[in-house]
Structures are given as structure tokens and as C-alpha cells.
Amino acid sequence: MKKHILYLFLISLAFTSCDDDETGDVAIQSYSPVTINLSLSDNNVTISESAIAGGHQDYTVTATLSEAQTLDYVVNFEQVGGNADENDYETHNIIIRAGATSGTSDISILQTGDIEGNENVTITATTFKTAKLSGDVVFKANIVDDYVNDVVKTSATWAGSYDYTVTGAAVSVDYCDIDLDVLLFDGSFGFVGYLGATGSCTETGEISGLADGTYYIAIDVYDNPIAQFGTNQPLPITFTYSQEHFDTSGTFVIGGFTTDSSPGTFLVAQVDVVNGYMYTITPL
């Protein structure tokens, strides 16, 4: 008999604990995802890659909530169409911080310098299950007019020193005291411009804007005040060149110059240009 009384007591307790109030209704909490509204600064754009300034063209995406929340909300981006790839654009997540009602980020079209022809890209926004996006937010861009980098950067350096003894005294000769300039000539040996004439012992310059053809790089011994010492030491000149976005790059050492070299201009390399941007540089 005591067991039956205990069971009845437990069943009664269970039903009583489920009552929300005197009516006996059970409390059920409902939940619905937060809505994130997205807007774009521009869309369905056609971009000339060759006209992009600063290496990227940005389009702002703004995410807003109707009221601040106690959690962070994140909007992600992903490519869903087009023949462009991840090297052609860049995206960053939007984070609406707890207590805030908006956040922004950019979709950037990049100036790659690759020869790819016309491209297009479609990018959509996604978020987590705790939120939903208002509408179908999609960014579309057509990328035309490939940017082709025709600039070859050059550097010539002869930094160094030579120590020797004169009548028991140690003397150090600094190669940077020699003033060398770097010049560019066309195929008829007409002067095109300087690739460095600053008086420093590392001269830097750029080759660009040339018509197809053959050109020559020359070293001009402008002034050599240490020739008077007659040390006649080798004066190696290291020449380096590179073209961003292309495999055109290299380094070679120019020989034949010494600490006794007299003023004069000497051809040291040949430059062949094809299509206005394809370079072959060959030491002479």
C-alpha cells in the first residue's frame, strides 16, 4: 500500500512541475532567425583592368540589422559563377559586432597583370543558421582590357672596397667614390634615357614604353677619382632586372671595369623588345 501512495505522489509532482501558471499551460519559447539586410555600392559592373588605380577596384557591401543583438553576426562571400579565379578578386567577411546594427566590407577586383582575356565573376553572400539574408544578394562583374605591365626595373651596384699598404700605411679605397651612370640606347645607338645617374653606387631605373626592337644598356664612367692611386683592382658591377607579373628577371656581373677605368661609355647588355612588354636582356 505504501508503494502505491509513493507512485501517486511522484506522478502528481511531475504534472504540477509542468504547469506554467494556474491555467496549467506549458510555456514554449519560440525562436526566429535575425534578418540581415545587405546593400551594394554598385553592381553588374564592367571594369577595365588596365584603368584600375592602386592595384584594386573596391565595391562596398553593407550589412544592417533592424536592432542591435547580443551576439556577433557574420556574412561570408563565395564565388558561384564566372571564369575568373581567386587571383582576380578579394573578399573579406562582414562582422556585425554585438551591440552594433551594421558592418561593412569590400569586394575588390584586382589588377593582376596576367594576360587572360575578358573574364567575369559572380559572388554571393551567405550567413549562419542563426540569421537569414534579405533577398538574393549577388555581386556580378565583367573584367575587360587586361593590364599588361611593361616596366622592367633595373639596378646596378658596385659597392665595395679595397685595402692596401703604401709606405707602411694602410689605405682603404671605397669603390663608391667612383661615379658610374647607367644609360639606355636604341638600336642605332641613339640616347634613349638614363637608368640611373644620381651619383650613388647603386643606380636604379626602369625600362618601359619602348617600341619593338633592339636596345643597349651602357655603363658610363662619369668620374673616377681613385684612378690616381693606380691600384688597378677589379670593379665588378652587379646588374639586376625584374618585371612584375612576368618571369623576366635575372642577375649578372659586368666585368672589364677596374679602379683605374678612365671616363667613357661602354655597352654591357642588349635588350630585345617584342609586343611592347616582352623583354629579353642579354649581357654582352
Image: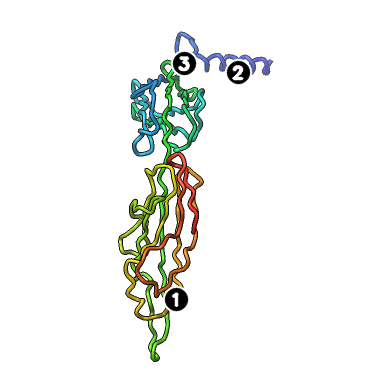
For the residue pair 266 and 129, the one nearer the viewer reads as 266
Is residue 41 toward the left or the right of residue 17 in the image?
left
For the residue pair 56 and 66, the one nearer the viewer reads as 56
Task: Please tell me whether mark 2 sits on a helix, a strand or a loop.
Answer: helix
Is residue 227 toward the left or the right of residue 253 in the image?
left
Residue 81: percent from left, percent from top = 51, 23
Would you say residue 95 is visible in this rendering? Answer: no
* Distance between the alpha carbons at the discs numbered 2 and 1: 106 Å
| Residue annotated with mark 3 | 30
Residue 139: percent from left, percent from top = 42, 23
User: Dot 1: few (<14), some (14–19), or many (≥20) neighbours within 10 Å?
Assistant: some
Q: Is residue 87 above or below residue 82?
A: below
| Residue annotated with mark 2 | 10
Is residue 30 toward the left or the right of residue 105 in the image?
right
| Residue annotated with mark 1 | 233
Residue 226: percent from left, percent from top = 35, 76
